[in-house]
Image: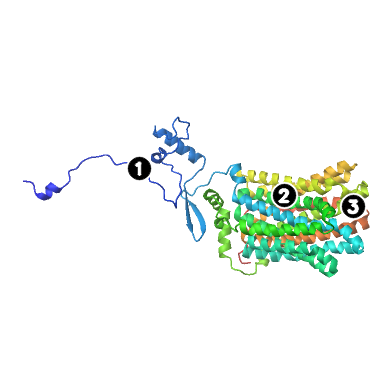
Amino acid sequence: MNSPAALRRPLPVSSPTPIKSPQTPKPSERQLPLTNSSASKLPCKLNHRNWWCKTSTACATEFSSRLRSERILPIRASSSNGSRSISSSSGGEFRQPTAVEFITSERVKVVAMLALALALCNADRVVMSVAIVPLSLSHGWRQSFAGVVQSSFLWGYLISPIAGGTLVDLYGGKVVMAWGVTLWSLATFLTPWAAENSLCALLAMRMLLGIAEGVALPCMNNMIARWFPQTERSRAVGLAMAGFQLGSAIGLTLSPILMSQGGLYGPFVIFGLSGFLWVLVWISATSSTPDKCHQISAYELQYIQNDGNMQSVIKDKSKKSKVIPPFKRLLSKLPTWTLIVANAMHSWGFFVILSWMPIYFKTIYHVDLRQAAWFSAVPWSMMAVAGYFAGVLSDMMIQRGISVTLTRKIMQSIGFIGPGIALVGLTMARSPSNASAWLTLAVGLKAFSHCGFLVNLQEIAPQYSGVLHGISNTAGTFAAIVGTVGAGYFVELVGSFKGFLLLTAFLYFSAALFWNFFATGGRVNFDETL
């Protein structure tokens, strides 16, 4: 007789393993299912007749393989302390965003705001070059004193980039850029009052303008390093610097119109108020880092954070204590000196062209370029377009496997050797039209430098990109002063504008050679003990 315990023992019955139904993801998690069992419930992507494919495992398998081939990976988003962070469950790379996704992304909104700020920066800078003639006539200034008024901007601009770059590394680009735009807009707005009351006040306002604008480019580099992965930084810099170059065209073109409608001080008031408006939008609509942005999508946030170099920037920022930067170690490395030489040569050529080409054309070809519309707009517009094209080309080269170092060397070589050849062609041109074509080509090719040394600042030392930019920018400002003043003395001693242009071309070739020997696109250890 069977015992009660035996009666209660369950009989061994072989039954198929129950199939688990797919579970609905929690609200805090979003993931793209890739398994066959879950893919059978996905909308059919293989052009089957029904919207929901229920037919075969083959459909799910093929759809899963297509997702993997397009590099769409499972992602998981979480929220804590108001900041969003997303980790990839597979640790793989993301697919590249489409053109529409890139244009509508939050990071493009950030770089668009940076471009507007740099446009205001350059417009506020060049408006004095238009207003200096009527100001001199109304106040009885001699030409030498008019030169002092214009150069007073460079006095402030010479001393601020290093301090501004250090502040950017400590407090971030958003805060420092907001203060910078506020101060230079205030200086621009108060320039009419200063000019009517005191020469010392006018010089002080021009110096304040230079000091405040000295933080603009370090802030731009800092924000781009935080918001853009390495494969998109060149085009981001191209977009931002396009605004900078268009600012010259805007300032030179609109200032006479605003003066005719609103008086001599009209441009100063309009550009100053525009800067205050920009600050309000910047503070309310942008974030210092992507993880603090509430409008950013989960895909864009993970795409940005998936960049290894981006993670190193965040890590370095969190570990670095607020101390004086290691200037001795920074200046002990050759890559730092490649940045200094490149920035100095870039500024030398830029200010020589801006300051002396009108006199050169008037002396050699008897053409007054100050009244020529193309000189006010076309060369700088050409530089803006060429800069963005160079950025797209540079990013494509990196995405296709060309090393970062080689890409930066190619871009910088075009940005130096190209203008050098164009300046040689300018000295041999026999007509104003041919000479103007060579000049426009020289200015346009200079924009390729933005995808050389200007992006390289973020790559060799992300934690010190601000102070490195400040050091190299100070050298560039000093070179601009030497080049602008030295050109006059050179012409007086030698008696030839063409000789100075040939000297500038030689310096371009020499700087390109130095860059190609010693530049690098990799991280440089500036924290090691000497």
**Residue type at numbered disc 1:** Ser
The residue at which mark 1 appears reads as: 21
Apparent side of residue 472 relative to residue 195 in the rendered image (left or right) = left
Question: Are the residues tagged 1 and 3 within 8 Å (C-beta)?
Answer: no
Please determine whether, in this image, residue 125 is positioned above or below residue 377. Answer: below
User: Can residue 181 be seen in this snapshot?
Assistant: yes
Closer to the camera, 279 or 435?
A: 279
Give me the residue at 88% from left, 46% from top: 427
**Residue type at numbered disc 2:** Ala
Q: Quadrant of the rendered structure where residue 147 is? A: bottom right
Q: CA distance from mark 3 to mark 2?
A: 26 Å
Q: Residue furthest left?
A: 1
The residue at which mark 3 appears reads as: 359
Give me the residue at 67% from left, 61% from top: 178
Question: Are the residues tagged 2 and 1 within 8 Å (C-beta)?
Answer: no
Mark closer to the chain start, 2 or 1? 1
Crowding at mark 3 (Cα within 10 Å: few <14, some 14-19, many 20+): some
Question: Horizontal and vertical percent for residue 522?
Answer: 62, 54
The residue at which mark 2 appears reads as: 242
Q: CA distance from mark 2 to mark 1?
A: 54 Å
Crowding at mark 2 (Cα within 10 Å: few <14, some 14-19, many 20+): many
Q: Could you tell me which quadrant the C terminus lies in?
A: bottom right
Indicate the secondary structure of the residue bearing disc 3: helix
Apparent side of residue 445 relative to residue 370 in the rendered image (left or right) = left
Tell me the mark number nearer the camera, choosing from 1 and 3: 1
Question: Horizontal and vertical percent for residue 37?
Answer: 38, 40
Mark closer to the chain start, 1 or 3? 1
Q: Quadrant of the rendered structure where residue 269 is? A: bottom right
Apparent side of residue 430 relative to residue 11 in the rendered image (left or right) = right
Closer to the camera, 355 or 183?
A: 183
Crowding at mark 1 (Cα within 10 Å: few <14, some 14-19, many 20+): few
